[in-house]
Amino acid sequence: MFAALSVGVLTFILVHFAANYTINNQYMSDDSVDARERGYIDNLQKYITQNELSSNDTADITKWVKNQRYVYLVIYKDTELIYDSIKAEEEEEAAKDKENDKDDDDSDTQSEASTGSDFWGSISDKTDDDISRYLDADATLFPIKLSDGIMFASIAEFTQELYYNLSYIISIMAAFILFAIIMMLYFNKTTLRIEKLAGNVRKIEQNNELPDLVIDGSDEIGELANDVNKMKNSIFEKMQKEQDAWKANTELITAMSHDIRNPLTVLLGYLDVMEMQKDTAPALKGYIDACRETALKIKNLSDDMFQYFLVFGKKDIDMSMQDYDAQTLLNQVVSEHMLLMTENGYKFITEPLEKECTISIDAAAFVRVIDNLFSNLKKYADIAQPIYIKASADDNNVILIMQNSTIQNDVESNGIGLKTCSKIMDAMNAGFEASSDDTTFTVKLTISIKKD
């Protein structure tokens, strides 16, 4: 901005100097001034001839002077000053002021007569004045012909003042325009740099392997680009550490799950062999059953822990969304579990989906959710009471409701299964709600219908 201001000031000085130089050396040259003065004299002479003016018609002469604007006129006869345009205008203004103070036309007429007398009196008082008092040393005298004789006139024109003022305005405008152009170019360049920086930041968001931003300039934008580079490197370093930690944790959980499941499987096998022995004492058989139950609890907890880690160990879950017929998918997924639980003595009251519609969902993830829900039914549902399953649809969503009566048992709930279901449904942009009271547990799944 300081550079643009400096250029603007320099432009003003140069343009103003060039304009004044041109006016002084060309427009105000002796030949140019003499030509303009002769032109005014010719115009005055034509005006006097057309209106047949005499030296007494000062009001008409003053009217001509006013029409010329930048003109000062002096007329004299021999050495006697008979007209001064400046004093004539002053006398005319004074006369108008006196006229405004009169109340009737008679007094106005008398005032005009006295004013004319005062004017010529003021001129006659200067009869003996030397005309050099009213003329410059280089003033040119031009003869003019009035109806009452030949007289001499001198004209001083000040049209150069108009051009001086115009040159001042042009200088200011030129300086302002150049200043504005420089500032617009600077702002445009700055805007392009900011847009480029913003585009590179968006690319960094999409790809963490981009090189550092190019820093062009040492101003605030350059410092911002340098800070963005530092922030990018810091974020990518943390992301890399997070990925390494996630990989290490995954390997650890996988190894732990393998190391826990294998001994448990062997232990359960030994317990089955011991239970099948015919000569096993009743007391010992009770201990075997307790060991089996404890081993199953450990197995279920390890499975839940592994599943919970896989779902909640990272922010985003990769989903393979595809379109399915809602009736076919729900009937297939739910019916398989109902059939197995019916063989184990559970009873169901169902209301199948009647509306034909299409849903976009990850089938494998949805099956995992249904598996978790039916696993909870096996653990906590009262086998003596029917399980209520209803599927319905409105204009926007398919709704699946599962409700069962609960029983108090020794199976401890850690809530991992329900949290996993909620996380999976949320990743598919679907809804999951679970509620319970002392005797009833209800789950509600909401899946958006795909519009044609």
Image (cartoon, grey):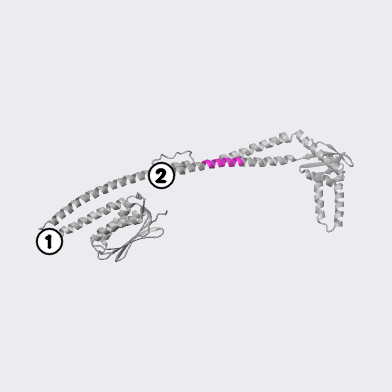
Magenta stretch secondary structure, dominant: helix
Residue 298 x, y percent position in the rendering: 22, 55
In this rendering, the answer to whether 346 lies above or below 367 is: below
Give the SS element for disc 2.
helix
Dot 2 crowding, Cα within 10 Å, few <14, some 14–19, many 20+:
few
Q: Tag on residue 192?
A: none
Q: Is residue 418 left or right of residue 20?
A: left
Residue 217 x, y percent position in the rendering: 48, 38
**Could you tell me if residue 334 is visible in this image?**
yes
Q: Which residue is mark 1?
A: 282
- Observer-nearest of 60 and 405: 405
Circles 2 and 1: CB atoms closer than 8 Å: no
Q: Identify the magenta region.
A: 177-189
- Observer-nearest of 441 and 60: 441
- Observer-nearest of 446 and 65: 446
Earlier sequence position, callout 2 versus callout 1:
2
Identified by mark 1, the residue type is Pro
Residue 56 x, y percent position in the rendering: 87, 45
- Residue at 66% across / 40% down in the picture? 170
Residue 222 x, y percent position in the rendering: 47, 41
Dot 1 crowding, Cα within 10 Å, few <14, some 14–19, many 20+:
few
Identified by mark 2, the residue type is Gln
